[in-house]
Image (tube, grey):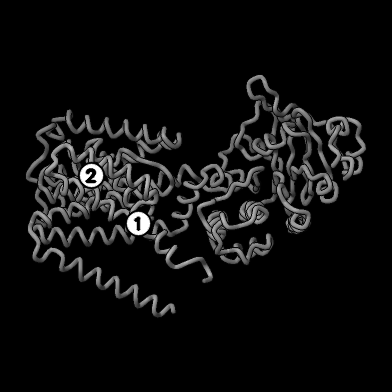
Amino acid sequence: MLTVRRLTKHFGGVVAVEDLSFTLAAGEILGLIGPNGAGKSTIFNLLTGLYRPDRGEILLNNENIIGLPVHQYARRGIGRTFQATRLFFTSSVAENIQVGCEVFHKKMTGQYIDEVLDLMNLSERIEKPVEQLTSAEQRRLMIALAMCASPKILLLDEPTAGMIAEEVSETLEMIQAIRNRGTSILFIEHNMRAVMNTCDRVIVINSGKLIAEGTPVKVRQNPDVIEAYLGKSDFHDA
Amino acid sequence: MMRRGLSYRSLMIITLFIGLFLLPFGVSYYILHILVMIGLWGMLILGLNLVGSMGYISICHGAFYGIGAYVASLLTLKTDMPFALNLIGGSASAGIASLLIGYPAFRVRGHYFAIITLAFGLIISLVFHNWSDVTNGDRGLSDIMGPIMDPMHYYYFTVFIVLAVILVTHKILYSRFGRKLRAIRSDENLAEQIGVKTFQTKLLAFLMSAVIAGLAGGMMAHYTNYIHPDLFSFANSFSMVMGMIVGGIGTTSGALSGGGVAIGLPEILRFTADARYIVMGIVLVLVMLFMPSGIAGTFYLYGREKKGPEGC
């Protein structure tokens, strides 16, 4: 479904992403992990057109999508969330979702809005101003907003950041439910337990380079990964 | 509850219509003139609101107002076209000008956009002053006669057009398109990321806003029967922005109260001569400090506060 080939991005002299290649299959949950500053969010920005790569290819169903206007990425079926919560904060939950859904569902908008809100367990909060939501609800609303496009691929940037254990489990269940609808998910997460229990495969990057790839069990035993994460107790505990 | 709400609203609308109908009776021509000008400026700010709703400030709406005025006037003076077509011609010309400036200007954001519109406004002002063969330079254009010459009739004509513009802009602001505008104001990058064609959306809002300004310009020219370049200067563009901010960005009642402030305040302060601009500046600063949502926004927030939290 998504093929990334030899993707490279430099910011001046800083190497953000170097020669990165990976694939994301249909219906797969692929974990993208790495230490802070490894280039994970930069990869998301490259995959959604916010940054233009210096080299490489991003193929969506064998079509190179580099250079498209940013709004076209969503229209081609790539939805995303952000590391820091980004929503239309001056509006209500309903208006946030309405804006997103109306772009893609000219008819039956109401039905799709209900479906997305149900999926993310936000139906009860529909009339609330975004500012009145809890942090966990705001992060779930961000996923709901990305789901408005009925994406084929969903890029989730730390979807459980700042959540308590119960909220994390609930959100991971929702992510599984999204996958069960046929959406492929690329998933940046620092909560290693969440990554190991949710992902089908994991890729690990460090300083913008791919250092390991495979099943969660295989990746956690990789010496390069252990070295990159040295001192991160949650990685060993996962 | 809903029946009560609806009947109250209907009553308000009927009262408003009766009020607007009776208003010109028993007032002097001077007051009538002020009312017509408030209506025209209300239109300008209603249009400008479409741009303001997406978080952008345009400082060239004086130019669109002027283009509409000059083109409609020239069509009246040089051709036998009917009045309505002359007004449409003025509006359309302002719309075309907005596309020419909007296309490059919306490649940048925020203050940079405002500066480009400022430059465009200054250029158009220079054109009005110096393209004497067409605009008659500083002497302006006179004898712009339309079919409505009686001030009271023109008042009713203005009220009719303003109500139509209110209806259209209200529909726009609360439509899918309006939600996109507010999304752009809230977080343009996020709007783009969820698939909103932000460039096209902004350009269309700018176009509609300029068309309204052009219509107001054509109406003003046929009302005063005389136009000259100073009516469409940077100062007027700035006054429109001030009216929009003081009234409250993105609201219909705010646009009309902003029009009232932009036209009414200088008239009230006329005895202070040029010092009125200082007073107007002070008013703007005070509003921004103490009523950041503008007159309409402050009333709305006050009403919500009085009503109490949701569910109570």
Chain of the residue that carries numbered disc 1 in the rendered image: B
Label 2's element? helix
Amino acid beneath label 1: Ala
- Residue depicted at x 12% and y 61%: B153
Note whether B166 is above or below A17 in the view shown.
Answer: below
Do discs 2 and 1 belong to a common subunit? yes
Q: How many marks?
A: 2
Compared across the picture, whether A47 is left or right of A68 comes to right
The residue nearer to you, when weighing A65 against A222, is A222
Residue where numbered disc 2 is placed: B68
Note whether A11 is above or below A132 in the view shown.
Answer: above
State the image quarter where residue A212 is shown.
top right
Please report contact status of discs 2 and 1: CB closer than 8 Å, yes or no.
no
- What number is the disc on residue A119? none
Amino acid beneath label 2: Gly
**Which numbered mark, 2 or 1, is in the foreground of this view?**
1
Compared across the picture, whether B152 is left or right of B310 comes to left
Chain of the residue that carries numbered disc 2 in the rendered image: B
Compared across the picture, whether B30 is left or right of A106 comes to left
State the image quarter where residue A15 is shown.
top right
State the image quarter where residue B16 is shown.
bottom left
Residue where numbered disc 1 is placed: B296
Mark toward the start of the polypeptide (2 vs 1): 2
